[in-house]
Image (cartoon, helix red, strand yellow):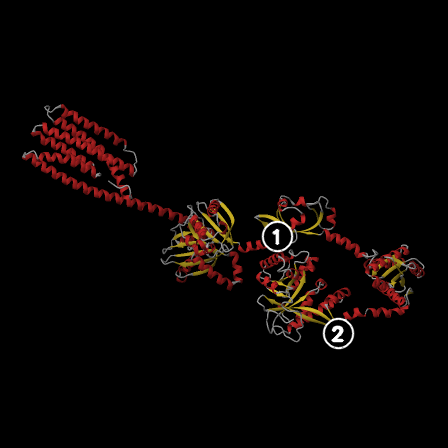
Amino acid sequence: MGDTTDPLGRSLLVEQFRVLRKQVPVLYAALLVNSISVGLLLPSTVSAWLRFALPAALLAACLFRLAQWLRLKKVDFTAEEAYRELVRVRLATALLSSSFVIWILALFMVVDPGLRVSVSLLLFMGCVGTAYCLGSFPPSSRLTMLIAGAPIATLLLLSGDGMLVSVGINLLALLVLLARMINTNFRSFVKLVETHGRLSEEGDRARAAEQTATAFAERFDRALNNMSQGLCFFDADQRLIVCNRQYLEVYDLDPKLVRPGMKLNEIVDLRYSAGSAPKMSKQDYLAWRNSAPVSAENSDTTVELTNGRIVRIRHRPMGDKGWVATHEDITERHRTERALAEAKSAAEQAEAAARAAHTHLTEALDVVPEGLAVFDKHDHLVLWNRQYAEFYAASRDALAAGTPFETILRTGLAGGQYPDAAGREEEWLTERLAHHALPQHSHEQHLAGDRWVRVEERHTSDGGSIGVRIDITDLKRREASFRLLFEENPLPMWVVDAKTRRLIAVNGAMCRHYGYSRQDLLAMSEHQLAYAEQQAAAECDCELHRTADGEVIEVVIESRPLVYDGRSAHVCVGFDVTERNRAQQRVSYLAGHDALTELPNRAALGQHLSAAIDRAEITGSAFAVLCIDLDHFKAINDRFGHAVGDAVLREAARRLQEVSQGSYVARVGGDEFIGIIDQAPLPATAELLATRMRAQFEQPIEVDGHALKIDLCVGVALYPRDAGDSVALLANADAALYRAKHEGRGAIRLFTSAMDQQLRDRRELEHDLLAAVERGELYLEYQPQQYRDGTVMAYEALVRWRHPVRGIIPPGEFIPIAERSGSIAQIDDWVLKEACREAASWDQPLRVAVNVSAAQFRRENLDRQVRRSLRDSGLPAARLELEITEGVLIEDMPRAKRTMQSLKALGILIALDDFGTGYSSLSYLEAFPLDRIKIDRSFVASLGQSDRSLAIVRAVIGLAHGLGVPVLAEGIETEKQMSLLMQEGCDEMQGYLIGRPRSLVSSRPGKSASRRAAS
């Protein structure tokens, strides 16, 4: 019997049972016939019990088993079930054979000796037939011969009759021969079953290979027909093996007419019929195609077709004298390729090499910057590229064809490849497999080494899947910098959904500024922050918001679009201008009024005076200007203090305004006042008003128990008699006042022409500044700037004034004077020219940085001035850097952008000075072409003292590096500041720790590159 534990034994059991199912009915039919024949042969003298009863019982048992086997004829059995049935067969064989033996022995005892041979032969033939029918089941066959056949032959041998003994011997020999035959047949039967099993296995493997080949052929067909070029294969007999859809489309061929096996000349006939043949005759074309240089060697040719198309053919011969060729329609590109022939040649060679290896799909995928992986319908890895393996380095050992996706994930988990899965590996694995099972899914994945990829997965039509991995590490780092800058920004910032306008992210500054918790803000929309009445806000170009405590604030909002958590949104920065607007209102009032006396100030006086001149010109009238000065005021101020002095000024202003009776009175500074009167007749009314003003001060001014005696000096000038414009009129009135004070206290004087000389003397100091450039009194000092490794790479130019009388005057004192007098333009031009001239003479090609004032930046000819300075000095444009503050950029951003673009066109560098202190520190980083960002000294000064300042500096450096712009920190004065900046990746440094400003006339820069320059 076969064994159920091995494949051959199981197959043998099933086959044994199958054969027995066919033979056993024949066996039992033979037994029936044999039993009946014996019964008929026996004489009537034999008892009925032996003649009919016992055979009838045996026949009934045979009929019962026959019925059982007939029921099993059409039933399929497993090896285990066949084994159980064969055991039953062996048992039934033993029982039936034993019963027949008993019957035979009984018959031998009662029948006549002459009948014993006939009966024995009949019964022995039944035994032989039974053994033969059971030949596929040797245990039962041998059992039958042993139990039934052997006793019959033995009885004949023991009978003593020579005839019976001879028959017994022959019967035993027949049993031996039958046993050998059955054994031989059974071995053949076993080999046949074994061979059949091997053939079945080979058939299964062949079918599996056929399925795999079919699937590969389908993928190959899809790849073939998705190529961007036409592709065709021909054998050595010039018969078409295969071509793709693009090949037919290139030559306008009907797919129904083109079939594998067609000859090349037949396809050429179709092309000439379709009008897509080369511009030559068919014979010439075939002769050219069959020529040795074309057919037997690699060739790249460009052919122009009769329909106007231009096709690039890349021919590659194969070892069997066939060839493969790609056909690419380059009609639109041909003209461009002519202009780029040399560059295109290298590209065509690379393309030809790539297409020659088009069957090596993995090599082509390795060129793709994204990671790619293909899985079959069983989720086993089929294909992957080098970038995918680099992303998942910890899973590299598991990246083999046929590896299940789950195994790859588990290998990565064991190698610590997924930081997010730490401590929850099985939960993470379940979630990842669930996402992978979706028809289409996209998510971001955190890998070891702080690397991020975006995973794009999609199932294919054949049940497999394609996965793409895109490296977003730089994007995530920029997002982190943005989030840090967002959260740590001192200004309120929020992100709002572009459609619903609901808040989806807020920073801490907004929570503090508006008084809401973060949860409350995230449950609100922008409309809930707005104050209902916006009319006042419209006038000042801002919005009205209400805080948690009900306070209404004025906010200017800067908004930029972005994608936040996969949805369209806007990031907003809120500038609270409430106090600024209040201050502006106050400033607007103070711009025209004196803060101490609330009289009109110098600015308001100028406007009033201009209006008075315009009226006088129209009406032909006149008016007088009174320049009024308080006598003894300086002594009062020095003796009793500024508080008493201020009280005196307020009282003096009240008395002057009271006595003027509607005439204009203004305070222009210190103890100096201006009055304007246009009542005729002049100058009598002016002198009368001056006299009344003096009379107002006959009574002392009482302040803190002090009776302070004050008198006036008044100078008067008339329009248009004494001057024709406001400047000259005021100057002449001032000159008259100067004469009055010179002649004695309490005097009133009218302007005369002799007073002009005194006015000119007072302007000498202003003239000194105007002439400082011409006299060579200005000079430059330079402060070094260095890289983080200590190498000096640039100097910043700083202007100084050496006055012949007052000595060195710092820029903080004379620059405002220059700006008021208008001489700043001349100084700006000189600084730019001188800095370029001196830098051009340095031994080393170091960069020079020059500050640009607001007035200089507003000039239309700044780019021409820079170009002239570079040309005159011979300094390369790349060595000049202009430093521009944030304030000048936001006044008129379109104009500022045009100016900076024209400057960049010269090749110079532009640095953003004092970054972070302006009104809009973020909006212009993308708008303007900046080469360097200078972190303001106010941030640097707090390093080592404030964690918030360090976080902001870190965010600014990260943001600048994300934009590809280097960062220079200015105002470095301590080693700790330097250390923190270097740790955060700051590129360049400047400050007293590096070097103080100094003249470079006697010492050439670049001789040494120490970390600290001499100060």
Q: Viewer-proximal residue, 165 or 956? A: 956
Q: Taking 727 as reference, is 543 left or right?
A: left
Q: Measured from the top left, where is residue 126 in percent x and y?
A: 16, 33
Q: Quadrant of residue 296?
A: bottom left
Mark 2: give few (<14), some (14-19) or many (20+) Cα within 10 Å: few
Q: Amino acid at mark 2?
A: Arg
For the N terminus, the quadrant is top left
For the C terminus, the quadrant is bottom right
Q: Viewer-proximal residue, 272 or 713? A: 713
The image's mark for residue 487 is 1
Vertical side of 14 occupied by 986: above or below: below
Label tally: 2
Q: Work out which residue is located at the far bottom of the displayed protein and give it.
A: 1002
User: Visible in this render: residue 913?
Assistant: no
For disc 2, the marked residue is: 775
Q: Measured from the top left, where is residue 173 in percent x and y?
A: 12, 39
User: Visible in this render: residue 819?
Assistant: yes
User: How far apart are the alpha carbons under marks 1 and 2?
Assistant: 54 Å
